[in-house]
Image (cartoon, helix red, strand yellow):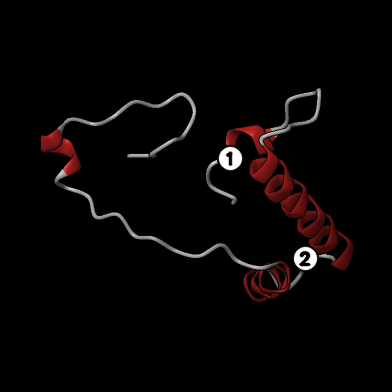
Amino acid sequence: MNYGYAGTRELNEALTSRFVVIQMPSIDQDGLVRLLGDEFPTLEKSTKSSLRSYSSICRKSAKTQKFPKRRSTCAVFSTRCV
């Protein structure tokens, strides 16, 4: 189900047939900040900025498949944030 996702395996056909794969483009940095502001109006500007930076790091790490020495959540989401 999570094609190319680390730590998962293929689902059998009977289970897979119950799902629909929806391809969605990645959200850009400005869109992410806008979404966070819309969904969490009380979220501090500094927190939004931190999440934007973290998202950027994850995207770069996923594209290059080079992760920080201390394995972060970016590695877990590497196939999803490209």
The image shows residue 25 at horizontal and vertical percentages of 50, 65
Task: Pick the quarter of the image with the N terminus.
Answer: top left
Seen at 44% across and 35% down, the residue is 4
Tags 2 and 1 in contact by the CB under 8 Å rule? no
> What is the secondary structure assignment of the residue under circle 2?
loop
Q: Which mark is residue 20?
A: none
Q: On the image, which quarter does residue 65 sit in?
A: top right
Callout 1 crowding tier (Cα within 10 Å): few <14, some 14–19, many ≥20? some
Q: Is residue 52 above or below residue 66?
A: below
Using residue 41 as the reference point, say whether residue 6 is left or right of it. left
Q: Residue furthest left?
A: 14
Question: Which mark sits nearer the N-terminus, 2 or 1?
Answer: 2
Give the residue type that dot 2 points to. Leu
Residue depicted at 22% across the width and 50% down the height: 19
Mark nearest the camera among 2 and 1 is 1
Outermost residue toward the front in this view? 64
Mark pair 2, 1: CA separation: 23 Å
Q: Secondary structure at mark 1?
A: loop
Q: Does 60 appear above or below 73?
A: below
Residue 40 placement (x, y as % from top left): 68, 68
Task: Identify the amino acid type marked 1.
Answer: Phe
Other-residue count near label 2 (Cα within 10 Å), few / some / many at <14 / 14–19 / ≥20? few
Check disc 2 and report the residue beneath it.
Answer: 43
Residue at 24% from the left image edge and 31% from the top image edge: 11
Residue 44 screen position, x and y as percent? 84, 65
In-front residue for pair 44/49: 49
81 relative to 8, above or below: below
| Residue at horizontal 34 percent and vertical 60 percent from the top | 22
x then y, percent, for residue 66: 73, 33
Q: Which residue is mark 1?
A: 77
